[in-house]
Image: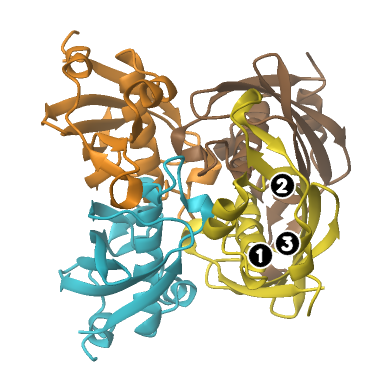
Chain colours: A yellow, B orange, C brown, D cyan
Amino acid sequence: MLSNRKEIHVEWGDCDPAGIVYYPRFFEYFDSCTNALFERAGFKKQEMLKKYGLLGIPMVDTRGQFYAPAAFGDTVVVETRIKEWGRSSFEVEHKLYNGDQLAAEGSEKRVWTVRDPGVAKGMRSEAIPQEVKDRFARE
Amino acid sequence: MLSNRKEIHVEWGDCDPAGIVYYPRFFEYFDSCTNALFERAGFKKQEMLKKYGLLGIPMVDTRGQFYAPAAFGDTVVVETRIKEWGRSSFEVEHKLYNGDQLAAEGSEKRVWTVRDPGVAKGMRSEAIPQEVKDRFARE
Amino acid sequence: MLSNRKEIHVEWGDCDPAGIVYYPRFFEYFDSCTNALFERAGFKKQEMLKKYGLLGIPMVDTRGQFYAPAAFGDTVVVETRIKEWGRSSFEVEHKLYNGDQLAAEGSEKRVWTVRDPGVAKGMRSEAIPQEVKDRFARE
Amino acid sequence: MLSNRKEIHVEWGDCDPAGIVYYPRFFEYFDSCTNALFERAGFKKQEMLKKYGLLGIPMVDTRGQFYAPAAFGDTVVVETRIKEWGRSSFEVEHKLYNGDQLAAEGSEKRVWTVRDPGVAKGMRSEAIPQEVKDRFARE
C-alpha cells in the first residue's frame, strides 16, 4: 500500500498558551497529510475535484490520540496510509513522530462526495472509482 | 451611517504561547464583524451571495494596529462601520475595545466580486448595487 | 450533572472550499464549549490555571463524528457535559445541533496537568481536586 | 541585508468558500516567514526567547495588500527581510509570489518584548540587543 511521509514545522501560531500544539491544529496537519498522500498517488486535489465532479472528501468520523506534546520549533514527521477502502468511504491512518517518539495518531473515515444539484444540500456520496483505488496499491 | 457592535469572547485557542491573542486571529474577528455589519443591514452572507451572484467580498488591502493585548477569557467589543463606498470597492473600519481601552483598530478595503466563467480565474469586480449602499445609510 | 448549552455562529472563515465547516474547526468549537462548561461551573480558565498551578487540561484522546454539514450563516447549538471523572483525567461529551438535527458529536479525554519544573517537559498530571468535581455535581 | 525565501503550500483548509486563501491565513504565512528569517539569522524562536527573556515579538502594526488570489494546491514563495531597525521595534517586509506574479505584500512593525513581573501585564519593551541586529547585516 502506498504511504506518504510529510515533514511539518510546528509554528508559533499553532501553539496555545501552554506552549504546545493546540490540538485542533493536529487535525489540520492530518488533513494536509491526507491531501499529500492523494497527491503522491497522482491526484492533486484541484484536478481530482474537477475530474470526478467531487465536492470533496468530507470527514464523517475522526479520532486523534496524543501521547506527547509538540512545541513551536519542533519538526514532526507524519506517516500516512489508506487503512481500508469501502465502496464510497475509506479510512486513513496517520502516525506523527516527534524525533523518535510516536507523539500522536490519527484515524479518519471520509466519504467520496460528489456535487448533485438534484438532491438536498446539493451533495451525495458515490462509489469510489476503481482507478482511484488502484493508484494506492503500489509502493 | 449604520454601525454594528459585536461582542467576542477571546478563546484559549485564539492565543499564542505568550498568552495573548495571536494577531492573525484579530483579522478573523474583524472579518466576522464585517459580515455581522452586513447582516445587520439585512444581508445575510449566503443570501447576498445568491442574490447578486457574488463570489464574495475579498480583501485587497487591510491594516491592523494593536495597542494593548487581549488574553483568553477577555470579552472584547468591536465597533464596525463602512467608512467609504467606492464604485466597486468599499472601506470598513473596526475599533476593538477591551474594557474601556481601545485595544486595536482595523481597516479594510474590499471589492464586490462576482462570478464570471468568461474571464480569467472566473471572477471580476462589479459596481456595488445602489440598493446595497442604501441599506447602510440609516442609523 | 451540570451541562452547558452554547450557541455558535458559523463564520465564513470556518468553512472550506466545499462551503461547509472545515472539520478541525469543530474541534475548536468543542474546545471552547469545554471551557464554557468549566466557566459555568465557576471556573474561569485564567483563574483556574492560577489557583491550581495548572498548565492546562490538554487533550489525550478525542473523537468527532459528523452526521450533517453546517455552513456559514448557520447558528449551531452545542450541549456539553462531563461524562466521567477519573483520578487525574476526565471525559467530556458534546452534541452539536444544527436546527433540530444532531449534526455532530464529540468526545474528549483530557488530563489535569500542572506545571512542575522538576520533571521532563516541565509538566505532569495530578489528581483532580474534589472541590472541582463537586462543582459539576449540581444541576 | 539578510533575506529569506520560504515556500508555502496552500492547503485546502487555508481556503474559504470562494475557493481562495482566507486572508487572515496570509498573516499566518507572514508570521511564519518572520520566524523563518530569524531562524536563518541563527535565532531559533525557542532559544531566542530563553536567551533574552523574551515574551515574544508581538505585532503592533501590520498591513497586507492582496493583488491576486491564491488557491489550494498552489505553492507560493515569500521573500522576507528586515526593512528597518528601531531601538526596541523593527519593521519586516514580505513579498509573496504565486508563480511569477507578485500576489501579496505584507509589512509589519513588531516590538522586542520581555517578561517583567514588576510591571502591568507582566511585559515591557526593551532595546533590541546589537548582536541580534548584527546577525541580519550579512548576506
State yes or no: discs 2 and 1 in contact (Cβ < 8 Å).
no
Q: Quadrant of the N terminus of chain C?
A: top right
Snapshot quadrant of residue B30 = top left
Left or right: where does residue C13 sit relative to residue C116? left
Residue type at mark 1: give it.
Answer: Phe
Give the class, few, some or many, for how many residues have Cα within 10 Å of label 3's Cα (few <14, many ≥20). Answer: some
Q: Chain of mark 3?
A: A
Q: Chain of mark 1?
A: A
Give the class, few, some or many, for how many residues have Cα within 10 Å of label 1's Cα (few <14, many ≥20). Answer: many
Residue type at mark 3: give it.
Answer: Val
Snapshot quadrant of residue D114 = bottom left
| Most foreground residue, D88 or A86 | A86
Above or below, D89 relative to C51: below
| Most foreground residue, B125 or B135 | B125
**Residue ID at (48%, 44%):** B14
Q: Quadrant of the C terminus of chain C?
A: top right
Q: Which mark is residue A112?
A: 2
Circle 1 is placed at which residue position? A38
Describe the element under mark 3 as helix, strand or loop: helix
**Residue mark closest to the camera, 3 vs 2:** 3
Q: Position of residue A31 (x, y in %)?
A: 64, 56
**Residue ID at (65%, 23%):** A120
Q: CA distance from mark 3 to mark 2?
A: 11 Å
Q: Position of residue C47 (x, y in %)?
A: 57, 36
Circle 3 is placed at which residue position? A132
**Residue ID at (73%, 62%):** A132
